[in-house]
Amino acid sequence: MAGTLRAKFDEGLPGMEAKLWHGHPVWLQDGVPVAGFKAYANFVTLLLWRGQRITDASGKLDASGSAEMGSVKLREADDVDAPLFDDWLRQLRELYRA
């Protein structure tokens, strides 16, 4: 699943720096975290730093933490909804370029 997410983020967040940040893959815009993921034994948490500011008609994004964080737990590869993730990443690009 990590490979699929990395490819999706690389494609959906062009020009953003991908690096390990606190031990987890994160994509940054001018040093500011935009999106990433964190792997656990039974799931992967998708992290969108301004995720509470994007439109999520699916209702899958949960508000979590601070800085308007949105997250979703992925338990299996089928949980990676490509069109939905593409839309979330498009909205993040627009937020960070505004």
Image (spheres, grey):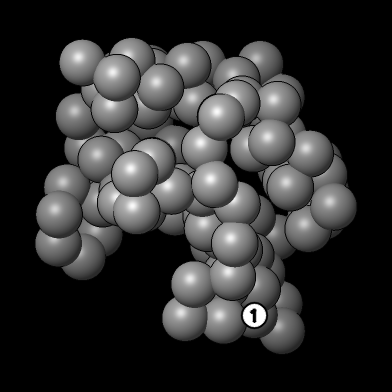
Q: For the residue labelled by badge 1, is the local secondary structure a helix, a strand or a loop?
A: loop
Q: Nearer the viewer, residue 39 or 35?
A: 35
Say which quadrant the N terminus sits in. bottom right
Name the quadrant of the C terminus.
top left
For label 1, the crowd category at 10 Å Cα-Cα, with few meaning under 14, some 14 to 19 and many 20 or more, is few
13 or 8: which is nearer to us?
13
Is residue 73 in sight in this rendering?
no
Amino acid on which the number 1 mark rests in the picture: Tyr
Give the residue displayed 54% in from the left and 47% down from the top: 17
Residue 47 appears in the picture as rendered: yes
Residue 95 to residue 48: above or below: above
Identify the residue under disc 1.
40
Picture quadrant of residue 83: top right
Q: Position of residue 73 (x, y in %)?
A: 54, 58
Residue sitting at 52 percent across and 37 percent down? 16
Relative to the observer, which residue lies in front, 42 or 87? 87
